[in-house]
Amino acid sequence: MRLLMSLLMLSCQKATELVEKKIYFRLSVFERIKLLFHTRNCEVCHHYQKQSVWLDKVLKCFLARDPNKITPVPPADLQAKIIRKIEAA
């Protein structure tokens, strides 16, 4: 029984990785079982999974309406904004 439990136990970090992977790719049977086992026993990851799926749907709907509304931020500008925020704190 301990061996089975150790095979099925995931850390919350690994569970969230699988949640995100599940949105874009097909999980293996073993990954699906491990994720299901974890989210049934971890309330935080269960809510994270629900919110992640919801957010993905919202973003897809938003982008389907007008993908030109989102303008990418150049990495240099983003880095400068982050540095300014850190220095201001």
Image (cartoon, rainbow, N blue to C red):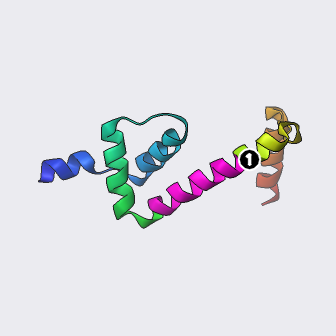
42 to the left or right of 23: left
Name the spot of residue 65 as percent of width and height, x first.
82, 43
In this rendering, the answer to whether 24 lies above or below 4 is above
| Along the viewing direction, whichever of 16 and 66 lies nearer the viewer | 66
Specify the quadrant of the image occupied by residue 18.
top left
Q: Is residue 81 magenta?
A: no
**Residue with the most extreme bottom position:** 43
27 to the left or right of 23: left
Quadrant where the C terminus is found in the figure = bottom right
Residue at 31% in and 46% down: 33
**Residue with the most extreme left position:** 1
Query: What element does badge 1 sit on?
Result: helix
73 to the left or right of 58: right
Residue at 30% in and 39% down: 30
Residue at 78% in and 47% down: 62
Q: Is residue 48 magenta?
A: yes
The residue identified by callout 1 is 61
| Along the viewing direction, whichever of 74 and 21 lies nearer the viewer | 21
The amino acid on which the numbered mark 1 sits, given as a three-letter code, is Cys
Q: What secondary structure is the magenta-colored segment mainly? A: helix
Near mark 1 (Cα within 10 A), the count class, few <14, some 14-19 or many ≥20, is: few
Name the spot of residue 8 as percent of width and height, x first.
26, 48
**Stretch in magenta:** 45-59
Residue at 43% in and 66% down: 43
